[in-house]
Amino acid sequence: MWSNLRVFRREGGFAWIERRSLRDAQLTELKKYAVFSKVTIAANDDLVLLGVAGFQARAALAPLFAALPDAATPVVSEGATSLLWFEHPGERFLLVTDVDTANRVTDALRGEAQFNNSQQWLALNIEAGLPVIDSANSGQFIPQATNLQALGGISFKKGCYTGQEMVARAKFPRRQ
């Protein structure tokens, strides 16, 4: 397993979020498959990630956006912003947006929210059971070892992908 990513629809296509230390290697691998489809795969350094968590996160964001994501609609787009919903460990939101919108949101939340760095979001991901694959441990696990099957992150019924045989053997061990 090279990495784990959060894939979502954005601006008529797809986008994904992963650890920055793996981005270039992942792009190289994904571009190998892009030649078989009419797709463009590229990094975007113009966007900002802004996490909003806590028991008042929804109430704090509600005045700033026309709609917020939830379990039924886990991604909502508004202008240049994609809002992603996370259920665990408590309701939280990740905004994928431009610098101007990120500044507007942080200005609106100033005085109402405590600001932290990305380590707080990482801690919440760990608490939620999401694996943290970084350059230090990339390629050292099969997906089941990171609990991805419990999160619905592995399909045993479709696809053909690198490492599929090892994943299937771990899921369906042969009885001798």
Image (cartoon, rainbow, N blue to C red):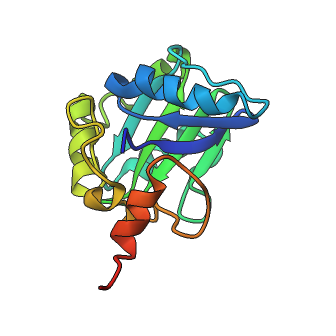
Answer whether residue 106 is visible to the viewer in this image. Answer: no
Question: In the picture, residue 20 is in which quadrant?
Answer: top left
- From the image, which quarter does the N terminus lie in? top left
Quarter of the C terminus within the rendering: bottom left
**Residue 128, relative to residue 141: is it above or below?**
below
Please tell me whether residue 167 is drawn above or below residue 58 in the rendered image.
below
Residue sitting nearer the eye, 91 or 10: 10
Left or right: residue 21 versus residue 79 is left
Residue 12: x percent and y percent? 76, 36
Vertical placement of residue 170 versus 173, above or below: above
Please provide percent x and percent y for residue 137: 22, 37
110 or 53, nearer to the observer: 53
Q: Is residue 124 visible?
A: yes
For image coordinates 27% across by 33% down, the residue present is: 134
Residue 38: image location, x then y, percent:
79, 30
The residue shown at (28%, 50%) is 131
Give the residue at x 63% y 33%.
Answer: 33
Residue drawn at (24%, 43%) of the image = 140
Residue lying furthest right: 38
Q: How many marks?
A: 0
Residue 89: name its quadrant. Answer: bottom left
Q: Residue furthest front?
A: 176
From the viewer's side, name the closer residue of 87 and 175: 175
Place of residue 157 in the rendered image (x, y in percent of width and height, measured from the top left): 58, 70
Q: Is residue 59 rendered to the left or right of residue 100? A: left
The relative height of residue 127 versus residue 102 in the rendered view (above or below) is below
